[in-house]
Image (spheres, grey):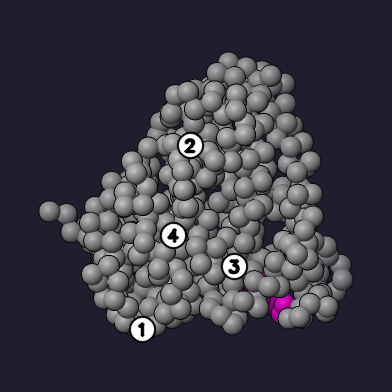
C-alpha cells in the first residue's frame, strides 16, 4: 500500500508534473496527512476550506519550519519563496500587516477607489490578442505555440502597464522569473545536482530582479515613475499612507510574478483542456456566453496555482481525523481539493455546465487572489479571440512539456496545428 509520504513524493516529482492527480487521489484517502517531519498536506475540500479561514493557520513564511534548514532528505526548504520579499509581501504575512498591505495595493488596483483600471484594459487586451494572431497569419504559420506566441505576451503587457514597468525590459525579467520559479522545487528532484544548480540560478535571479525593481521604485519615490508602483510609494492620501520602498519591492515581485505567470498558465490550460475534450472548442465558439463558466471549470480541473508553501500551524489543530501540531508546515493543496469527489461529482471530468462550481483555483480566505478579476478578464478575452479566429486546432503533443514548478504549474509549450487563422 502506498504511504502518504510516497504519494506526496510522487506528486512532487517532475516526471509526474503532467498528471499529479492520481497521487493527489491517493493522498485524499487521508484528507489531512503527515507526509514528512513537520509537514502536513491538506487535500480534502472541506478540510481545506476550514483551514483557509482558520486564524490558527499562519501565512507568515518565517514561522514555517520549511523556511529554515532542510528538515529531512524528503523535504527541501522552500527558500526561494523568500523571493516574495526579504521584507515580506502580503502573501506571506498575517493580519494586521497583511491587511494594511492589501488595502494599499487594492486602493490603486480595484474598486471602490480604482473601479475603471481593470475594465479599462479591455481594448488593449483585445488589440494585442488580434495582433498576435495577425502575426501568425501573416507568417503563413499553420502551427502555433499557444504559450510563447499567445498566452505569454498578453498578461505581461497588462501587468507592465498597470505596475508602470517598461515593457521593453521584459526579456530581462522573463529570464529571471523563469529561473526563480524553476528553483522553487519541493520534490525529490531538488536534491539532485541539476536541482541544486537550478536553486543556485534561482538565488542569482532573485537578487537581479529585486535590484531591478528596487531601482525602479526608487525612481518612483522621487516622482519619476507611474502606475501602481509609483502610487504605492507616493500615496499620502490613503488611510495607511505610502508603502515603505523596501516593502514595495517585495510586493512588486509578487505582483509581477503572480500578475502574469498564473494567467499564462490559465490561458494555456484553457486551450489545452478544450482540445483534449472533443466538441467543447466548437461548443464555446458557438456559445461564447459559456466562456466564463468554462474558465472556472478549467481552473477547478487544472489549477494554475496548485498550492503555496508558506503556511504553518500556530496551535494544535484537530481536523479530518488528524491533529496538526503547533509549528508544523501546512500545505493547502488547491489542485487536490478541487477534485475531491465529496464536493464535485465525477471530479476528473471537464464539465462546462458543472453547477455550484466553487473551486479553489483563485485561492480562498484572506489570501484569495487580489488579481482574480483582472485574470478572469484577460483569460476571457484571450480565449474568446482564439475561439473566434482559429479554425481546426489540433494538439501536436499531449501531454505537452511542463515547467519545473509544482506551485505555478503550467505547460512550457502547447503546440497546436491549425487549418487557418481567419
Q: Residues within 10 Å of mark 4 (few under 14, many from 20)?
A: many
Viewer-side residue, 390 vs 210: 390
Q: Secondary structure at mark 2?
A: loop
Tag in front: 3 or 4: 4
Residue furthest to the right: 223
Residue 264 vertical position relative to residue 285 in the rendered view, above or below:
below
Residue 244 inside the magenta-drawn segment: yes
The residue that disc 4 covers is 307
Tag in front: 2 or 1: 2
x and y percentages locating residue 15 in the rendered image: 32, 45
Residue 116 vertical position relative to residue 229 in the rendered view, above or below:
above
Q: Residues within 10 Å of mark 3 (few under 14, many from 20)?
A: few
The residue that disc 2 covers is 353
The residue that disc 1 covers is 315
Left or right: where does residue 19 sit relative to residue 134?
left
Residue 252 lies in quadrant:
bottom right
Identified at 78% across, 62% down, the residue is: 114
> Which numbered circle lies on residue 300?
none
- Separation of marks 3 and 4 at Cα, in angstroms: 24 Å
Magenta-colored span:
243-250
Residue 198 vertical position relative to residue 213 in the rendered view, above or below:
above
Point out the tag, 1 or 3, that comes first from the N-terminus.
3
The residue that disc 3 covers is 207
Q: Secondary structure at mark 3?
A: helix
Viewer-side residue, 210 vs 52: 52
x and y percentages locating residue 167 in the rendered image: 75, 50
Amino acid at each position: 500500500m502506498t504511504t502518504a509520504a510516497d504519494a506526496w513524493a510522487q506528486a512532487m516529482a517532475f516526471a509526474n508534473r503532467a498528471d499529479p492527480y492520481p497521487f493527489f487521489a491517493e493522498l485524499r484517502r487521508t484528507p489531512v496527512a503527515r507526509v514528512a517531519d513537520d509537514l502536513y498536506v491538506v487535500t480534502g475540500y472541506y478540510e481545506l476550506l476550514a483551514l483557509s479561514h482558520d486564524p490558527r493557520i499562519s501565512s507568515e513564511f518565517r514561522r514555517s519550519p520549511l523556511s529554515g534548514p532542510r528538515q529531512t532528505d524528503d523535504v527541501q526548504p522552500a527558500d526561494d519563496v523568500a523571493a516574495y520579499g526579504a521584507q515580506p509581501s502580503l502573501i506571506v504575512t498575517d493580519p494586521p500587516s497583511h491587511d494594511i498591505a492589501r488595502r494599499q495595493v487594492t486602493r490603486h488596483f480595484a474598486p471602490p477607489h480604482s473601479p475603471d483600471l481593470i475594465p479599462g484594459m479591455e481594448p488593449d487586451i483585445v488589440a494585442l490578442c488580434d495582433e498576435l494572431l495577425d502575426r501568425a497569419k501573416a507568417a503563413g504559420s499553420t502551427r502555433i505555440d499557444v504559450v510563447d506566441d499567445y498566452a505569454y505576451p498578453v498578461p505581461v503587457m497588462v501587468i507592465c502597464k498597470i505596475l508602470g514597468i517598461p515593457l521593453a525590459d521584459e526579456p530581462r525579467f522573463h529570464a529571471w522569473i523563469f529561473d526563480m520559479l524553476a528553483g522553487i522545487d519541493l520534490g525529490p528532484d531538488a536534491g539532485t545536482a541539476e536541482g541544486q544548480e537550478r536553486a543556485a540560478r534561482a538565488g542569482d535571479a532573485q537578487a537581479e530582479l529585486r535590484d531591478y525593481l528596487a531601482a525602479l521604485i526608487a525612481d518612483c519615490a522621487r516622482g519619476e515613475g507611474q502606475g501602481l508602483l509609483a502610487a504605492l510609494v507616493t500615496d499620502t492620501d490613503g488611510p495607511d499612507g505610502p508603502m515603505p520602498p523596501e516593502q514595495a519591492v517585495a510586493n512588486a515581485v509578487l505582483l509581477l510574478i503572480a500578475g502574469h505567470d498564473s494567467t499564462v498558465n490559465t490561458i494555456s490550460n484553457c486551450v489545452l483542456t478544450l482540445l483534449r475534450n472533443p466538441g467543447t472548442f466548437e461548443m464555446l465558439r458557438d456559445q461564447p456566453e459559456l466562456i466564463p463558466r468554462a474558465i472556472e471549470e478549467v481552473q477547478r480541473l487544472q489549477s494554475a496555482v496548485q498550492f503555496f508553501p508558506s503556511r504553518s500551524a500556530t496551535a494544535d489543530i484537530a481536523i479530518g481525523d488528524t491533529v496538526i501540531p503547533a509549528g508544523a508546515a501546512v500545505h493547502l493543496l488547491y489542485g487536490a481539493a478541487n477534485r475531491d469527489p465529496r464536493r464535485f461529482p465525477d471530479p476528473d471530468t471537464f464539465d462546462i455546465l458543472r453547477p455550484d462550481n466553487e473551486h479553489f483555483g483563485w485561492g480562498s480566505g484572506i489570501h484569495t487572489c487580489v488579481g482574480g478579476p483582472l485574470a478572469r478578464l484577460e483569460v476571457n478575452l484571450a480565449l474568446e479571440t482564439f475561439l473566434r479566429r482559429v479554425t481546426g486546432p489540433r494538439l501536436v503533443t499531449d501531454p505537452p512539456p511542463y515547467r519545473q514548478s509544482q506551485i505555478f504549474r503550467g505547460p512550457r509549450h502547447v503546440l497546436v496545428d491549425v487549418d487557418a487563422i481567419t
